[in-house]
Image (cartoon, rainbow, N blue to C red):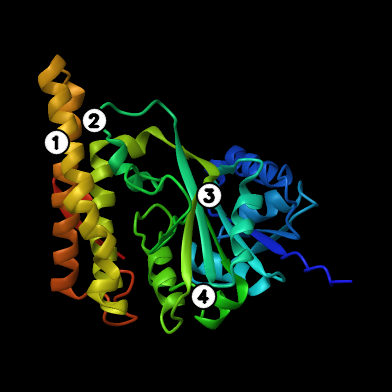
Amino acid sequence: MLDRIKPLSVTVVICAYTSERWGMLLDVIESVRNQTLAPDQVLVVIDHNEDLYERLIEIVDDVTVVESEGLPGLSGARNTGVGLAESDIVAFLDDDAEAAPDWLERLVALYDDPDVLGVGGKVVPLWESGRPGYFAEELDWIVGCSHRGLPRVASEVRNVIGANMSFRLDVLRQVGGFNQSLGRKGTLPLGCEETEICIRSRMGLPGSRIVYEPAALVHHHVPASRGTWRYMMSRSWAEGLSKAQVSQLVGHKRALGPERRYVRSVLPRAVFTGLKSWGRDGSPDGLGRAGAVIAVLACTAAGYFQGRRLQHWTGPEEEDVVLVPAGAQWREVQ
């Protein structure tokens, strides 16, 4: 008789930092409870918020609630989860991203291929006040969601999206976890920590793959404040700065390959579609979408070149210094 293959074990890590998302956090935990594939372990990592930790630990007894042992920020919280995981696979959810019932099952199914190091899924925005008319779907990465132009079927990609991703635990530990100089810190809209770890995990492993499975869905709450022009510009600038840092860490070719294709093909179509809509029916939304795409591209590029020029990322003393928009000015944040 052939031995049955042991199923892969899975840990789900949910990172939270603010009490303002209390209701959402409870909904995320409930969505994990309702999975068709039950996780072996659920860890909720509280990012340096003692009040939130004490409040949550009093009401939940079927998940493990821990405090982050890393530096403040999402990367440090995720690394705490990685350090405590006791499974083959670690899947990550944001504290405002509810998983569809078959989310985990669809992610884990791709790990039947031993060359697959990580699998991520589609992140669908749930707009608090409805999608602004000028906010093109091609720009949904700004709010941490899947944007138009990503594959529609399971495909190999450079990197997955932070709100919906998973990795083999041994891979995460071999590469030393997430880079704590990257990623969101509280409300500061930096990013690219998932890009960097996906690139780093494949270096030296020919034939290894990172896979995007759009059938593995999570729904990401997007507050009205993140649909504003001000947030769009702030996040775009921060993305440029983050990409500059990743480029220095892993090389420009690895860091910017998909972005070049996105700029060459996805964004021109978005501008053309917006202008066509405006010309056809006089819709100000079409003109707004075209303008937003151009403005976001320009702001992201400016942030990238500013990051390269100022070399903010050369030492530990400077790793948390960035420039973010403050009205019409740019201000320094420590």
Residue 291, numbered label: 1
Residue occupied by mark 3: 18
Q: Are marks 1 and 2 in contact (CB under 8 Å)?
A: yes
Which quarter of the figure is the C terminus placed in? bottom left
Residue 279, position as x, y percentages in the image: 10, 21
Q: Secondary structure at mark 3?
A: loop
Residue occupied by mark 2: 134
The residues tagged by marks 2 and 4 sit, at their Cα atoms, a distance apart of 37 Å
Q: Are marks 3 and 2 in contact (CB under 8 Å)?
A: no
Q: Earlier in the sequence, mark 3 or mark 1?
A: 3
What amino acid type is highlighted by mark number 1? Answer: Gly
Residue 177, numbered label: 4
Residue 294, position as x, y percentages in the image: 14, 43
Pick whichever, 109 or 32, lies toward us: 109
At x 18%, y 30%, the residue is: 274
Seen in the picture, residue 169 relative to 101 is either above or below; the reply is: below
Dividing the picture into quadrants, the one containing residue 174 is bottom right
Q: Secondary structure at mark 4?
A: loop
The residues tagged by marks 3 and 1 sit, at their Cα atoms, a distance apart of 33 Å
Pick whichever, 150 or 97, lies toward us: 150
Q: Secondary structure at mark 2?
A: loop
